[in-house]
Amino acid sequence: MSDAPKHTYESDGVRRIASDGLWEDAYGYSRAVQLPTGVVLVSGCTSVVDGRIAEGGPYEQAVTAFGVGVKALNDLGLGAEHVVRTRMYVTHAGDADDVGRAHKEVFGAVRPAATMVVVAGLIDPSLVVEIELEAFRAPSGGPA
């Protein structure tokens, strides 16, 4: 995975970045969108890196997916400490503890609002977890 975002563009104070995500260009979405209010929305992230699904089970897939999401935040100058909400989609209820353990390792000190939902499936049947992140950084000149 490249260190720099694939492309970044800004319109009306909304900044959008793309990564090398497999479906971004095909489906027409951005990896992350930063609003003028300081809110950053990170699209669903899976364990697909460089076009391949990362090896391992639910825990490893979650760690990789969180890494993809945090990298998108890093591309906008934010980090895990800016995350205020996470959403985790798992394909098996039995994977909740593994995914939750990965979440705690990344966000335990931050303690964002979090939701975990069991879904029927993801875009590739080999994927067992997908995550979304929302982050916040006060706009320049605003309260910290």
Image (tube, rainbow, N blue to C red):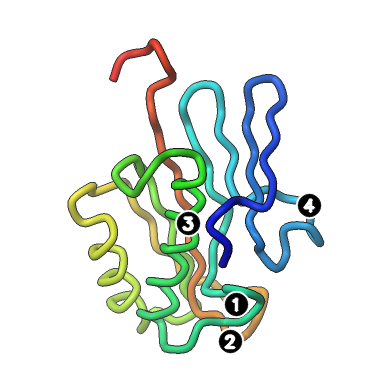
Q: Is mark 2 on a helix, strand or loop?
A: loop
Determine the CA span between mark 4 and mark 3. 18 Å
Give the amino acid type for the residue marked by disc 2 in the picture. Ser
Marks 2 and 3, the one that precedes in the sequence: 3
Q: Which of 134 and 77 is in front in this view?
A: 77
Quadrant assignment for the C terminus: top left
Mark 1 Cα-neighbour bin, 10 Å: few <14, some 14–19, many ≥20: some
Q: What element carries label 3?
A: helix
Q: Mark 3 points at which residue?
A: 69
Res. 28 mark: 4
- Foreground mark, 4 or 1? 4
Marks 2 and 1, the one that precedes in the sequence: 1
The residue lying at 56 percent from left, 80 percent from top is 127
Q: Is residue 129 above or below residue 52?
A: above
Give the amino acid type for the residue marked by disc 3 in the picture. Gly
The residue lying at 45 percent from left, 81 percent from top is 92
Give the residue at the far front of this rendering: 3
